[in-house]
Amino acid sequence: MVAGNPSSCNPHPGTNAPAPVVVLTVIVGMAADTVSASLALARPKTASAQEPPPPEETKLPLHERSPIHGPGGAMAVDTQRIHQASLLPSLPYRIFYEDFESWPPAGWTIVNNSGNCVWESTTTTGMPNLTGGAGDAADANSDWCGPDTTMDTELRTPPINLFGVSQAWLIFKSDFYDYLNRDHGYVDISTDGGTTWTTLLHYDRQDYRARIEIIDLTPHVGSANTIIRFRYVAPGWDWWWQVDEVEIYVSYGTFLPLVTRNYRP
């Protein structure tokens, strides 16, 4: 955080953030007409993060921020929010996992499209892990970068093999903190090694605080050169996007039968 400004202007993010709530955001694809994912597969880490001292800066305090979110109360891509009993088949094969306990993560690519700062570790930014995970998280943190900051940065996975897969799901923990209804977070997929991209999820100029996101990748399976990217865009000195515990689960062959699992956030 930036020193030398009144600390009363910015309540501590760790204490003012809402209690972590698991939100399942399921992208409905052309090839998937049922909701299917395994919440049990998104397991927390065992370490715990220590919160930093209260930050000092000049942004508006929370109670003075506009309560009006950006246009469209939902994300740009059609979604279903599931808060109670869901149809959740088990996907037995985890083929990818990253918990960001080392930085930069092996095989990942950090891209700076424009701006002053890029994705970092919470160890570097000094932030606690606010995703609901533990230990370190990936942190695109405009607030940490300071005044006159702009950001357009990507965090890309290594190539992932989804060839021969019948179903696939992306699961990750996330904390997206907008400022003045102007920041964007995108989860995109490429099936040609990063040449072209399709948006799976869009955080559109409002807060999407501590949550688990589960996204159906089934419409995009078939490529051995699949890449997922997390792109954060902030036009000024804003807040952050944290991502942790990125996982991909798949099944092969016949679609798995649905079972009912009860879940309440």
Image: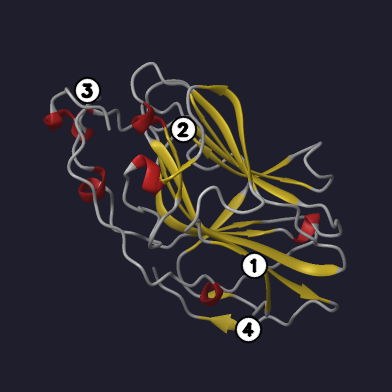
Q: Are marks 1 and 4 in contact (CB under 8 Å)?
A: no
Residue type beneath disc 4: Val
* Disc 2: which residue: 205
Residue type beneath disc 2: Arg
Residue 232 is labelled as none
Circle nearer the viewer, 2 or 3: 3
Circle nearer the viewer, 1 or 2: 2
Rendered view: 39 above or below 183: below
Residue type beneath disc 3: Thr
Viewer-proximal residue among 23 and 129: 129
Question: Residue 31 in the image: x percent, y percent?
Answer: 80, 61
Question: Residue 248 in the image: x percent, y percent?
Answer: 65, 64
Question: Residue 109 in the image: x percent, y percent?
Answer: 65, 42
- Say which residue appears at 35% left-offset and 32% top-offset: 144
- Say which residue appears at 75% left-offset and 39% top-offset: 197
First in sequence: mark 1 vs mark 3: 1
First in sequence: mark 1 vs mark 4: 1
* Disc 4: which residue: 259
Image color mode: secondary structure
Viewer-proximal residue among 32 and 112: 112
Between the residue at mark 4 and the residue at mark 3, the CA separation in whole angstroms equals 51 Å
Between the residue at mark 1 and the residue at mark 4, the CA separation in whole angstroms equals 11 Å
Q: Are marks 2 and 4 in contact (CB under 8 Å)?
A: no
- Under tag 2, what secondary structure? loop
Circle nearer the viewer, 2 or 4: 2
Between the residue at mark 2 and the residue at mark 3, the CA separation in whole angstroms equals 21 Å
Could you say which quadrant of the image residue 153 lies in?
A: top right
* Disc 1: which residue: 35
- Under tag 4, what secondary structure? loop
Circle nearer the viewer, 1 or 3: 3
Residue type beneath disc 1: Val
